[in-house]
Amino acid sequence: MIKRLFDVTVSLLLSAGLVVPMLFIALAVRMKLGKPVIFSQQRPGYNGRVFKLRKFRTMLDIADEHGAPLEDALRITRFGLWLRRTSLDELPELWNVLKGEMSLVGPRPLLMEYLSLYTPEQARRHQVRPGITGWAQVNGRNAVDWDQRLRMDVWYVDNRTFLLDLKILWMTLFKVIKSEGVSQAGHVTVDRFRGSRE
């Protein structure tokens, strides 16, 4: 209850305080990347329940001759990369937090297609609400490999406390300022998860 109350209070305060910057970001996205301004995608949440994640769009809508989206490196723009490095693309997720679909802190909500690839231990990351930031995000983010990230997600599930959440939020502030761990080596974002190597 304390965590949920904290999530709602902080999200309301941030949403109110950032409404003008978010409007300017939305306008910039519309001008530079087109519409829709908000990128929506189904993700698994608490206990695997599906919800619609919302972020500011960071990529162009470009497809090949068969209609399949081109690789990220060809679709992302300098403006989109800037949004990701500053984590400003994540701001619409405050709405997901207010709706109770996400928390400020928790394992990041990943793609639906990954569900069948998790080991039973890795799947335990869904025992809590997904978060805007998390233990893996402040300990390497996309710069560490998938097995490490998923181990850290499960570690958070087993060791979560309100004080740990506060620590993660504080560490997140510095990670965002330094733009650390935004992409994986050799990728503009992160390579896809293809199953555990352990």
Image (cartoon, grey):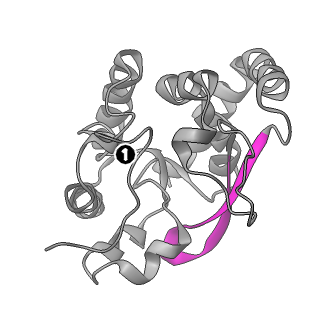
Could you say which quadrant of the image residue 90 lies in?
Answer: top right
Question: Is residue 10 positioned above or below 19 on the image?
Answer: below
Q: Residues within 10 Å of mark 1 (few under 14, many from 20)?
A: many
Residue 19: x and y in percent read: 77, 22
Above or below for 115 versus 20: below
Residue 130 shown in magenta: no
The magenta span reads 38-54
Q: Position of residue 29 (x, y in %)?
A: 77, 27
Would residue 80 appear left or right of 109 to someone viewing this image?
right
Q: Quadrant of residue 60?
A: top right
Q: Nearer the viewer, residue 1 or 131?
A: 131
The location of residue 142, given as percent across then percent down, is: 34, 43
Instruction: Pick the residue in front: 9 or 115.
Output: 115
| Residue at (44% x, 53% y) in the render | 108
Image mark count: 1
Question: Residue furthest toward the left?
Answer: 198
- Residue behind mark 1: 134
Q: Is residue 136 left or right of residue 79?
A: left
Q: Does the magenta stretch mainly form a helix, a strand or a loop?
A: strand
In the image, residue 53 lies in the stretch drawn in magenta? yes
| 102 relative to 119, above or below | above
Q: Nearer the viewer, residue 96 or 185?
A: 185
The residue at 58%/40% (across/down) is: 74
Closer to the camera in the image, 111 or 49: 111
